[in-house]
Image (cartoon, rainbow, N blue to C red):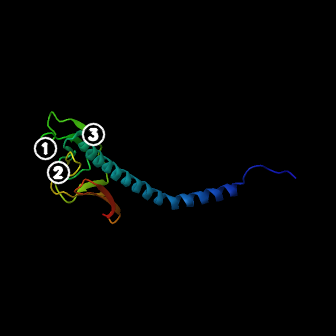
Amino acid sequence: MIRSKGFTLTELLIVLALAVILATLAAPNFRDFVRSTRMTSEANSLVLGLNLARSEAVKRGQRVNLSSASGDEFWTTGWAMYEDTDADGTQDGGEPSIRVGEGMDPPLTLEETVSSASFISYQSSGVLSVSPLTRTFDLCESDRTGETGRQITISVTGRVSIADLGC
């Protein structure tokens, strides 16, 4: 009896059909996983910037601001961190930059909801120094209504927290 090595064409087609079925079932879940991971990453990036601004204000003994790159309440285009020695809320020529945060790719949107101020200011003690003293940002995806986004809140003491949000 001669024994052949390998697979028959029928066996290969069955395995290929099963692989296609599994890939079809897994693709939507993987896409949602990637989108959720990207949202979490962007939220953590903003929290990192806020915490860094607070710690730099304490370390330098100087007011440190974090401002939106667009100059309004929409922070999607990125942010800039700088010393604000004259406490006017804008970066003047002699005030050093500390760090710049990159913008977010669409369809992510980051908007401050409580205030329309274009900057956040930390005093040398690490507390917020611009009214309103509690600041809230909503991070959502513009093409996923009803899905979970992230809400980033800064308390009066400068502490940053993240919570889920229905966008």
Residue at 40%, 57% in the rendered image = 36
Residue type at mark 3 is Arg
In the image, residue 97 sits, relative to residue 147, either above or below, namely: above
Q: Quadrant of residue 144?
A: bottom left
Q: Secondary structure at mark 3?
A: strand
Q: For the residue carrying disc 3, how many other residues have a C-alpha within 10 Å: few (<14), some (14-19), or many (20+)?
A: some
Whole-percent x, y for residue 60 in the image: 23, 39
In the image, residue 4 sits, relative to residue 143, either above or below, namely: above
Whole-percent x, y for residue 103 in the image: 29, 46
Structural distance between the alpha carbons of marks 1 and 3? 18 Å
The answer to the question of whether label 1 and label 2 lie on touching residues, with beta carbons closer than 8 A, is: yes
The answer to the question of whether label 1 and label 3 lie on touching residues, with beta carbons closer than 8 A, is: no
The answer to the question of whether label 2 and label 3 lie on touching residues, with beta carbons closer than 8 A, is: no
Q: Secondary structure at mark 1?
A: loop
Dot 3 corresponds to which residue? 99
In the image, residue 86 sits, relative to residue 146, either above or below, namely: above
Residue at 40%, 55% in the rendered image = 35
Residue 132 in sight from this viewpoint: yes
Dot 1 corresponds to which residue? 87
Q: Is residue 134 left or right of residue 146?
A: left
Q: Earlier in the sequence, mark 2 or mark 3?
A: 3
Position of the C terminus, as image quadrant, is bottom left
Q: Secondary structure at mark 2?
A: loop
Structural distance between the alpha carbons of marks 1 and 2? 10 Å
Q: Earlier in the sequence, mark 1 or mark 3?
A: 1
Structural distance between the alpha carbons of marks 2 and 3? 20 Å
Q: For the residue carrying disc 1, how many other residues have a C-alpha within 10 Å: few (<14), some (14-19), or many (20+)?
A: some
Between disc 2 and disc 3, the foreground one is 2
Which label sits on residue 129? 2
Residue type at mark 1 is Ala
Residue at 43%, 54% in the rendered image = 34
The one of 166 and 13 positioned closer to us in this rendering: 166
